[in-house]
Image: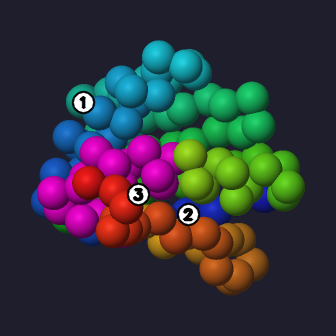
Amino acid sequence: MARSTARVSTDRPARYAKQLAAHMGRKVPAEWSEETGSGSLVFGAGRAELTAEDGALLLSVEGAEEALAQLEDVVGRHLVRFGTRDELVVAWQREGGEAGTVQRLTGEEG
């Protein structure tokens, strides 16, 4: 299994994680715990973990090597859409040190 992580700077990490889990939960199994500040999303191609920390939302995705870019894109794209006002940027770092995909607000969105 391949793995990729992203640290998204935000003053509202728990709010965004909860919103992401609720939204994705309409299509895939998802959970969010206010108590632990963590949650997960389960896709056919892999899994995502969400962890709220002071000043940042930590994301990780894990799946088959060929599905990693798609997992990064789905999780990152939805988060960026929710965080339009805060101009969130999700820059993934793959296991082994290589850069993953990047999701950010573009002129076409918002």
Question: In the image, which disc is placed on residue 58?
Answer: 3
Question: Are there few (<14), some (14-19), or many (20+) residues within 10 Å of tag 3?
Answer: some
The mark found on residue 34 in the picture is: 1
**Upstream in the sequence, badge 2 or badge 3?**
2
**Residue 28, position as x, y percentages in the image:** 58, 21
Q: In what element is the residue under mark 1?
A: loop
Establish if 78 lies above or below 90. Answer: above
Between marks 2 and 3, how big is the CA–CA gap?
7 Å
Residue 76 image offset from top left, x and y in percent: 48, 54
Residue that protrudes farthest toward the front in the picture: 108
Q: CA distance from mark 3 to mark 1?
A: 15 Å
Find numbered disc 2 in the image and state the secondary structure of the residue it sits on: strand
User: Magenta stretch: dominant SS?
Assistant: helix
Name the quadrant containing residue 90: bottom left
Foreground residue among 69 and 107: 107
Query: Mark 3: which secondary structure?
Result: strand
Question: Which label was assigned to residue 5?
Answer: 2
Look at label 2 and name its amino acid.
Thr
* Residue 84, placed above or below residue 82: below
Q: Magenta residues?
A: 75-89
Q: Amino acid type of disc 1? A: Glu
Q: Amino acid at mark 3?
A: Leu
Name the residue: 26% across, 54% down: 110
What's the residue at 76%, 37% (across, down)?
45
Tags 2 and 3 in contact by the CB under 8 Å rule?
Answer: yes
Question: Is residue 47 found left or right of 55 in the rendered image?
Answer: right
Asked if the stretch drawn in magenta spans residue 78, the answer is yes
